[in-house]
Image: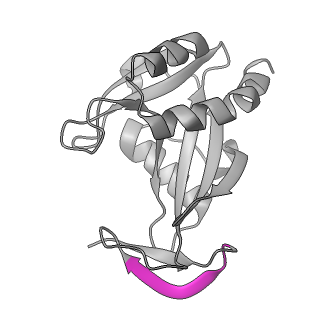
């Protein structure tokens, strides 16, 4: 059984915990982290969701819910390692921005890590494929609905920030 810390709307810890898979109450918020891994040569790393997951077969960036007792950087380090086998120190991640929706706070990170695709280790039950794609290819995948709407919206919002980092 997995638990998440409960935050208020201002992202302050409440001291209470939420059991994953249950409905969030009004005024309760979880914390979710996502990372755009880029290679510095114009490509982003995407993974494909496994058949047993929601949005099965669609492509996404790595990320997930922050577990109880973790902070944002600990969670994104863990999520990336679990989903791709890529190891990165917390200080290697750059926070792009934070946001909030109905029941979640979000931290969106980027990470410059040029990992050969054959070194990516997929997590059974989570991911079943990975590939490096150009920004143009991401747009084409969005048009073909190969990327779910939530990730597509994130990409469109973060694209200018990511392009800045790609050119450095």
> Front-most of 9 and 43?
9
Image-based side of 50 in relation to 87, left or right = left
The region drawn magenta spans 11-18
Q: Residue at x 48, y 63 (%)?
A: 66
Q: Position of residue 108 (x, y in %)?
A: 63, 46
Image-based side of 124 in relation to 28, left or right = left
**Residue 6, placed above or below residue 84:** below
Name the quarter where the C terminus is drawn.
Answer: top right
Q: Position of residue 41 (x, y in %)?
A: 66, 12
Q: Position of residue 12 (x, y in %)?
A: 66, 79
Q: In the image as oriented, which residue stretches furthest toward the left?
A: 52
Characterize the magenta stretch by its predominant secondary structure. Answer: strand
Q: Residue at x 51, y 67 (%)?
A: 103
Can you tell which quarter of the image residue 160 is in? top right
Image-based side of 91 in relation to 60, left or right = right
Please tell me whether residue 38 belongs to the stretch shown in magenta: no
Residue 78 visible here: yes
**Residue 143, placed above or below residue 81:** above
Q: Residue at x 34, y 30 (%)?
A: 58
> Front-most of 10 and 132?
10
């Amino acid at each position: 059984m997995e638990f998440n810390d409960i935050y208020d709307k201002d992202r302050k810890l409440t001291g209470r915990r939420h059991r994953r898979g249950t409905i969030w109450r009004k005024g309760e918020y979880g914390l979710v982290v996502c990372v755009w891994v880029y290679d510095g040569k114009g490509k982003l790393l995407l993974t494909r969701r496994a058949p047993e997951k929601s949005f099965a077969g669609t492509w996404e960036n790595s990320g997930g819910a922050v577990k109880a007792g973790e902070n944002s950087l600990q969670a994104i380090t863990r999520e990336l390692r679990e989903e791709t086998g890529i190891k990165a120190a917390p200080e290697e991640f750059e926070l792009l921005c934070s946001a909030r929706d109905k029941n979640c706070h979000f931290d969106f990170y980027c990470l410059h890590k040029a990992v050969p695709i054959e070194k990516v280790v997929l997590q059974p039950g989570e991911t079943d494929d990975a590939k490096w794609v150009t920004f143009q290819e991401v747009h084409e995948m969005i048009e073909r609905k190969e990327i779910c709407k939530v990730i597509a919206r994130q990409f469109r919002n973060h694209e200018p920030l990511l392009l800045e980092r790609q050119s450095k």
